[in-house]
Amino acid sequence: MKHFALAGNPNCGKTTLFNALTGSTAHVGNWPGVTVDKKEGVYKKCKEPISIVDLPGIYSLSPYTPEEIISRNFILDEKPDCIINIVDATNLERNLYLSTQILEIDVPVVIALNMIDLIEKNGDSLDPAALERKLGVPVVCISAAKEENIEKLMDIAYNESLKKRVGTTILESGALSHLIQDCKAAFTGLEVNNPLFHSIKLIENDEIEVQNHKELVKIVEEFKKTFSDDTFGSDLEAIVADGRYQYIAKNLSIAKKKNKEQSETLTTSDKIDKVLTNRWAGIPIFLVILFLIFHLTFSENLFYFPGAIFQSAGVEACFKGSMFKGLFWTEAGINSPGVILFNFLDSITGGITDMVGGWLESAPGWVSGFICDGILGGVFAVLSFIPQILLLFLFFSILEDTGYMARVAFILDRIFRRFGLSGRAFMPMIMGFGCSVPAMINTRTLADQNERTATVRVIPFFSCGAKLPILTAIAGGICQIFHFPSVDLITYSMYLIGILTAIVSVIVMRNTTMRGAVPPFIMELPTYHRPQFKALMIHLWDKLKHYVKKAFTIILVSTILIWFLSHFAWNWRFIDDADMDQSILAGIGQLFTPIFTPLGFGLQLTYKFSWIFVVAAITGLIAKENVIATFGTLAACIIGTIIDVEADGGDVLATVTMIEGTGITWQALIAFIVFNMTTIPCFAAVATAKGELPKKKFWTTILFWLATSYFVSMMIYLVFSWWWTCFIFIAVIVGAGFAIHYYNRYRDNKEIARI
Ligand code: GDP
Ligand code: MG
């Protein structure tokens, strides 16, 4: 099978093209650095199937970060049959800088001028034929997003792959031409592949090249002695780079005829940027947008006034008792789209559980208990959150795809820098809101190892999709039992507490174990795009698949296990719901319960059920959905046997049952949420962290998660319960701050003294 590689600058549309060609669903986002690992797929519409590899974006073939090295090594070592070099036509000059380097390799190349739809929309025009004549390789205009011309591109690439191509360079006629010839002869003598490419890299003083061919460095050194350029002296690296840009400006920019209107459309985007990335307004705008998203997803009171009108106008009376109330609105007001969808799905799953319960009426009690509580209770508790999770991700994907998130990274860089991170670290963090696993992998875009470790550690604090059920269900329970005004305010503050914990942790780490300078953050702001419907749907579909799959595998197994452990005593005797406190599960839970007393959900709860929250937190270490699944499974056993609860239904009901059954306080519930949000995320994330972190840092990371979650949730519980304890924590924190500061000064002084 033939192998083609997609190479190009970050954000030029490689992954979009890859998805279109191979029918894959790889992540597309409007910011540089989304793809950090190569991905393979198969294109089937050519004469023979072709394997396509999507590579991380690179600006040049002299790499700095791990993901850039992946691209270079693939292009050089794996010898693809053809490289499709994708060029963002709206940013031609900068993109062609990489093309001039790719052309130096002995490999068939096709240039795909992407985003041609934007060029047409702006009224610009391109002259691909002129470019083709200058570069000597085929040039095809495509639109990856609209899937225009991509079959033609593949046909041309296939034809090229049948030929042989020898690398060419645009530096051939420049001042360095003799040196290039000499080096090339030397490399050819050594029988190195791609002699032209390696010669020029050696001349550029490329780190990897110099290391691999120390014996040839002297050719360049000899030359340097006799050579001096007017502007750059004997800095050959600068001369080469300048040579490329000069050539592009003189010879290749003719391909694009600028339309006058172009400058005007640019200013609209500039104008928007002036507001969104404003020094003072930028962050408040981001926080407001974030709040609106939560409001639309979680609120039971979307608009205050219409809700009141509904009641006063007697509209409610018309529908009284009908299914509309509760689904679309409550006494508090109109439900948000997220809550409406949630209620809808909840009533379906509730109906199914009732129906199955009806069928099993004549079966033995434990059978219906096992099926309705053990299986359906747990799995449905998790599944009913799908609408809200998808809605949240729809909003996030829109922000990402338009290019807004890249702006947020830009504004946050200024602040992040003070904490010891670059704005680049923001991208993996935002991905953490979706799932920690890809987010941790995405930290490969960070060049500094200490910055990377610190980022991997705080990613779980950006509450992921699996933690959303915990937030919503418990926040709902708090509102119902303790009469808090709004669910979305609680969820929003919980997300903020997570972010705050992340910031404080980074400050501490960057001043203690993870010290080091913050690398500079250079990122171009991507142009604003209208979000692509297809890309959004791919995102959501992926998320849905992943979540449902988890519900029916790991969550299902866990709930079944929990049901059995909670219905058998140590001597394998089956026990009734009412005696659940004698079960194996209760025994295990009681073992750990004392540890959680300072967090509010330990020994102070009603003895019979004090272990439930602890068990839920422990099962959550496997996967966070387990927390609510555990409630779902166990709640059904408590209801009816011990207490009488009245609630809206569904999973809030499960939580309400837990609250009534244990007598837990709202302060402890908040602490419980915070504990789950900041502790060991889940098995999958732990495994990923193990792969991404240096060996020595893995166990300390686990310890770090446990310690942080314990400390933060204890602080929350104590301060909320007894406000004056805040003085103790302030003293501890200030003391620790001073200690770190003075210790660092002492260490730095010692260092200076040594030098
Ligand atoms: P990569 O970093 O090179 O993999 O780029 P992506 O495939 O992630 O795409 C970056 C952004 O460009 C996304 O917002 C895409 O929707 C957008 N995009 C990609 N191809 C096109 C195109 O042909 N036309 C337009 N208008 N947008 C595109
Ligand atoms: Mg990509």
Image (tube, grey):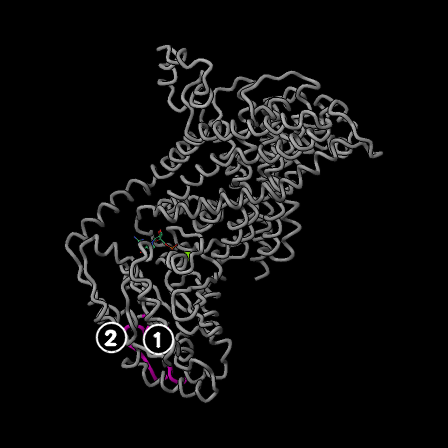
Examine the image and state in which quarter residue 202 appears. Answer: bottom left
Name the N-terminal-most of marks 1 and 2: 2
- Judged from the image, the secondary structure of the residue bearing numbered disc 1 is helix
Does residue 233 belong to the magenta stretch?
A: yes
Res. 238 visible in picture: no
| x then y, percent, for residue 348 | 52, 29
* Residue at position x 48%, y 61% in the image: 39
Give the label on residue 160, or none. Answer: 1
Task: Please give the name of the residue rendered at 42% of the width and 78% of the height, measured from the top-left corner.
Answer: 198
Q: Position of residue 150 (x, y in %)?
A: 33, 62
* SS at circle 2: helix
- The amino acid on which the numbered mark 1 sits, given as a three-letter code, is Glu
Location of residue 11 in the rendering, given as x and y in whole percent from the top left corner:
37, 56
Nearer-the-camera pick, 134 or 450: 134
Decide if ligand 1 comes within 8 Å of the CB at mark 1.
no
Q: How far apart are marks 1 and 2 (CA)?
A: 17 Å
Circle 2 residue: 134
